[in-house]
Image (cartoon, rainbow, N blue to C red):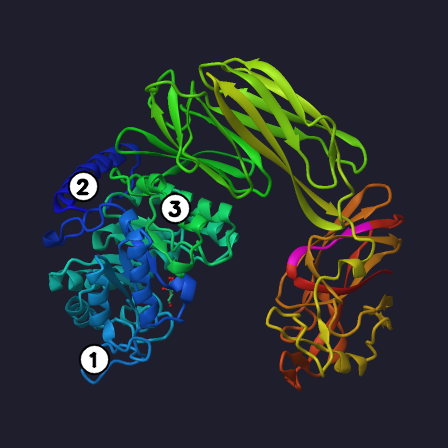
Amino acid sequence: MTPRAHHLRTLLALFSAVAVALALTVLAPVATPVARAVPSQGVLAPTPPMGFNDWAGFGCNIDEKLFTDTADAMASLGLRKAGYDYVNVDDCWMQRDRDADGNLQVDTTRFPHGMKWLADYVHARGLKFGIYEDAGYKTCQGAAGSYGHFQQDADLYASWGVDYLKLDYCYQPLDQYPGKTPAEVAHIVYHQASQAIANTGRPMIFSESAPAYFCCQGQNFSDVMSWIGQEGELWRFGSDIYDAWPSVLQNYREDNTPGLADYAGPDHWNDADMLEIGNGGLSLTEAQSQFTVWSELASPLLLSTTLSKLSPAELAVVENRDVIAVDQDPLGVQGRVVQSGQGYDVLSRPLANGDRAVVLFNKGDTAQTITTTAQNVGADPGSRYELFDLVSKRRTETTGTIAANVPPHGTVMYRVSTGVSGALPPATAVTVGSGTFQAGKPTPVKVTFTNHGSSSVDRVDVRLDVPDGWTVKSASRPFAVVKPGASVTATFDVVSSPPPPGLASKTLEASVRYSWRGQNLTETGAETVITNTPYESLAQAFNNIGVTDESNPAPGDFDGGGDSYSAQALAAQGATPGATITANGAGFTWPDAAAGTRDNVQAQGQLVQLSGSGSALAFLGAEAGFSSGTVTVTYTDGTTSSASLGFPNWCCSDQHAYGATPVIVTDHRNTPSGPANFGIQYVVFYNSIPLTAGKTVATVQLPDQPAIHVFAMAVQ
Ligand code: GLA
């Protein structure tokens, strides 16, 4: 960016900050953050910082080369041009102890050239350099913390050319401040650190982790939030991100803590943590959603992966200028949820040019059409609105309805402007809906196509594609015209194939081709059909190897760490494949499975057929964890009963927890490298739930609790 552009942006951001502050005092009676008292430094983060931080992708597995490679890739891949300019080193760059003069010592095995050299390397590529420390006694990984050394450390960072400090808050020095609340102690130390940075005279963005240690409610959290913006530019407020969809949802939820968005604005950002894109745990749809939602929430955009290995599709996600422009919008107002429904949220944020950035977020596991209005999202009133889809780049116009069919875990992000310049095709949306499928029987599937714009479309062709093995009679239906505000519905008779046992998901894809003023256009939508079909027996549902042979323990994995029961130790207690085990009056058949093959069910809500009547349903099982969940029994007359089931941990908890009884007690286990842990008891337990008297069991639904492992079931 040219110095002039930077100057303009800073001025605009300052102006916006004042405008936002004024708006907030009217709208929300919260403590409005005051800019940090570091006049010489000006506004350091007029928009949320963008760049790289290693932690989510690498943990302590870092070295100098990771950061030189990252800096090179940021320049060569176009990321720097897209706005990514910080290269930040997280924990593990320093040693466990300070030197005799109290100076932090760089881990020279990982960083042989030291931090000044690395900062210079990063600066030479037109980028900025960030570093990590902790306001407590130690960093979260146990290296030397900054408490008691804030000035000394800040001077050191300044001498290296550091531009950004993330100050974590493990090992809090609470004992130094008797009588003070944890929030007051946090304020003292973060203020000291903030002053120390200011005293260096070097502009450094200050990222404070304190709120994350009080997330996200209660007096300490609100106390910390009341001063956090006076000391730094951004703050982690919640959980550490990890590379899986539930983590993205969790941080999203925390970022929507009531009142939190009020603290965001130019130079003050809620940090939802790093982007996991590229690390393998998110589908491309989920990766796009994290990027879209983080941008809507004005979070910092910090990549945390091997940049040179990003696929072209992933690179397209993180370099999407239109989405980045929302994140970096100079008005700096964090998006908020303006409408919610079954598995979805609609978010909206005002943008500096008067537009609205709107996200339709499908948090659920099935595709759905999400519908809102220009009024709901706070767009300036008008008779027509332009919708610019920031990912597909499609521009359409609507008279007010904003709708899209969104895939599971997916998002659609629009820039909504009031008024339309020039001719645009109408916004359209597809909804797919059906009843319950019964294998082999035709089920009507309705595909509705709606025209939300102000001009007609014609030569409309509605088509439905069904999953392999399913059939649909005449897959397409023509309609001559669909007028503004009108819908057409095509009904297709679909015959499904028998679903496989267990949980399965199938997608029906609808596509509607139409013509608008001679242009051929397409709108798509989908329906997701999720089935949970009973297994014929528990053995058919086996999905885990819990028992291995001592001569070949490698295939087993009972506990998620590669460990398993020893077949020899079990045999010594009478538990051999197919043997009868009697416990508390119940007769079980021990899994008839060879060592090293699937022999138990890790419970995830599976349905299993079982017949018999009695007073109790008995289980043989154990846990690689410690939790309970609900078992639901369905009887032949269609009624159900539910009860809670839990087992003690296989080795290491009270052997009677959850009302269980130890049945097979072995004296060691197998690990991938052989039999081990002799003298520790590895146990299989009996537990039971009551059955309704006089009824006959038809199916059993296991708890949705993967810590629970079931080897056998019996009606008693
Ligand atoms: C905490 C932080 C993470 C990371 C680690 C490093 O868990 O929340 O972001 O900095 O410490 O140890």
Mark 1–mark 2 distance (CA, rounded to whole Å)? 41 Å
Q: Is residue 369 left or right of residue 663?
A: left
Please report the residue visible at 21 percent of the width from the left and 71 percent of the height from the top: 117
- Residue 503 visible in the snapshot: yes
- Whether 324 is drawn above or below 140: the answer is above
Q: Amino acid at mark 3?
A: Trp
Q: Secondary structure at mark 3?
A: helix
Dot 2 beta carbon under 8 Å from ligand 1: no
Observer-nearest residue: 307 or 534? Answer: 307
Q: Is residue 139 left or right of residue 278?
A: left
Mark in the foreground, 1 or 2: 2
Give the labeled residue for mark 3. 294
Magenta-drawn segment: 699-705
> Main SS type for the magenta part?
strand
Mark earlier in primary sequence (1, 2): 2
Please report the residue visible at 71 percent of the width from the left and 62 percent of the height from the top: 543
Q: Secondary structure at mark 1?
A: loop
Q: Are marks 2 and 3 in contact (CB under 8 Å)?
A: no
Give the labeled residue for mark 2. 9
Please report the residue visible at 81 percent of the width from the left and 50 percent of the height from the top: 699
Observer-nearest residue: 631 or 199? Answer: 199
